[in-house]
Amino acid sequence: MRILVIADEESKYFWDFYEKGKLDGIDLILSAGDLNPNYLSFLTTLANVPVLYVHGNHDDKYDTKPPEGCICIEDSIYVHEGVRILGLGGSMRYKPGRNQYTEKEMHWRVKKLWFTLFMHRGFDILLTHAPAYQLNDGRDIAHQGFQVFLDLMKKYKPKFFVHGHVHMTYGRKYKRYDKYEDTHVINAYERCIFDYEEEDVEHNLRSQ
C-alpha cells in the first residue's frame, strides 16, 4: 500500500503545479493537520482515494468548513484494507484555544480509547499533529511533543508514527525520518510518500 502523508504547508507540487498522473499509485492519503480544507478536498477529488485527517492547532476553521469528501479520524481507529490507523490531533497547549491539550488532557483522550484499542487489538499507524516528547520535537512549549505518544508506541508497537507540526524549514535538526523502538517515525511536513509493507519497511521508505 502506497501512502501519501501531508502536513503544515500545501505542496506546490500538487496545489500549484498539478498534472495528471502525479497521484497515480497512491492508495491512501493521511493529513497530519494545519492544512487548508480546500487542499484536502482537492486531493481527494483528484486521487479518488480516502483522505483521512486529524486537526492541527491552526485548524479551527474545520469546525465551520470541514474538508469535503474527507474523513476525520480524531479519537478513533480507522481500518483501511486491514491497516489500523489511530488518530490524535492537536498540539501542546500554549495559549487559550481549540485543538490544544496539556499532557494530562492528551493522556485522558488516550485513556478513553481503551475499549477501541482492545477491540482492534492495537493499531498499525499512529497519526497525530504533534510529535512525541523529545522525539523530533521542539523545546518551546508550542512545539513540545507528548509523552503519551511514546507510551502508545512502547505498548502497541505500531509500524509507523506519522506527525506534523515541526516544520523542516525550522532548522536542520528536524528530521524527515526517525525510529522509536520498533516504530518508524515520519515527519509529514509538506509531503512524503512511503510504502506500507509487512516486510522490509526500512527499504520502502522514500520521500518525493
Image: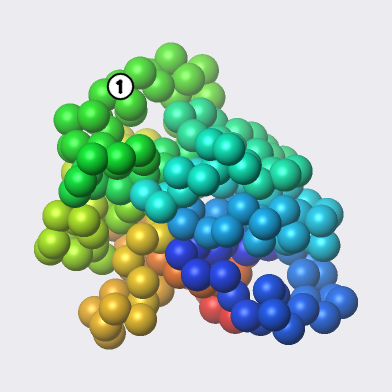
Q: Is residue 162 left or right of residue 166?
A: right
Residue type, numbered disc 1: Lys
Which residue is at 26% across, 82% downward?
A: 171
Please tell me which residue lies in front, 68 or 184: 68
Please tell me which residue lies in front, 58 or 43: 58
Which residue is at 41% across, 66% downward?
A: 187
**Residue 158 picture location, percent across and down:** 43, 45
Please tell me which residue lies in front, 141 or 160: 141
Residue 163 visible somewhere in the drawing: yes
Q: Residues within 10 Å of mark 1 (few under 14, many from 20)?
A: few
> Badge 1 is on which residue?
111
Please tell me which residue lies in front, 12 or 179: 12
Residue 146 visible somewhere in the drawing: no
**Residue 173 picture location, percent across and down:** 24, 79
Which residue is at 84% across, 76% downward?
A: 21
Which residue is at 17% across, 30% downward?
A: 104
**Residue 36 picture location, percent across and down:** 58, 59
Q: Is residue 134 left or right of residue 32?
A: left
